[in-house]
Image (tube, rainbow, N blue to C red):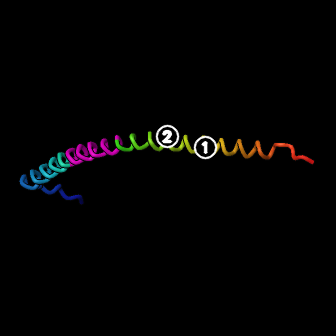
Amino acid sequence: MSQPPVRVSPLIKFGRWSLLLVGIAYGAAHQSRLSKKEEKVRAIEAQQKAVRDAKIAEEKKRSADAEAKALAELSKPTPK
């Protein structure tokens, strides 16, 4: 009942393998290019993170100082 497998033309086999290899080479080159681009972006983000972290630390310090001052104002005994 089962039919024997169809013999595939050598030209078609060659075309399939060629396209597979070309696709793999393209993927590797594309990945390499994107990796280099992403590396540059990450370096820029690392520089910006340092600046951003410094600003956040300064804001937290200011906020903590303001909160401490407000608590000191609230905790002072009121004259009667």
Q: In the visual, does 23 lie left or right of 53?
A: left
Please provide the residue range marked out in magenta: 27-43
Kindly identify which residue carries mark 2. 54
Q: Residue 28 falls in which quadrant of the image?
A: top left
Residue at horizontal 69%, vertical 45%? 67
In percent of width and height, residue 80 lies at 93, 48
Q: Measure how far apart labels 2 and 1 are at the Cα level.
A: 12 Å
Query: Is the residue 11 above or below the residue 51 in the image?
Result: below
Farthest residue to the left: give it.
Answer: 11
Asked whether 17 or 69 is in front, the reply is 69
Is 65 in the magenta?
A: no
**On-image quarter of the N terminus:** bottom left
Q: In the visual, does 15 lie left or right of 47?
A: left
Q: Earlier in the sequence, mark 2 or mark 1?
A: 2
In percent of width and height, residue 2 lies at 23, 58
Nearest-to-viewer mark from 2 and 1: 1
Q: Amino acid at mark 2?
A: Ala
Q: Residue 35 falls in which quadrant of the image?
A: top left
Farthest residue to the front: give it.
Answer: 79
Q: Main secondary structure of the magenta part?
A: helix
In percent of width and height, residue 30 lies at 22, 48
Number of residues whose C-alpha sits closer than 10 Å to that of mark 2, classed few (under 14), some (14–19) or many (20 or more): few
Residue at horizontal 15%, vertical 47%? 21
* Residue 62, numbered circle: 1
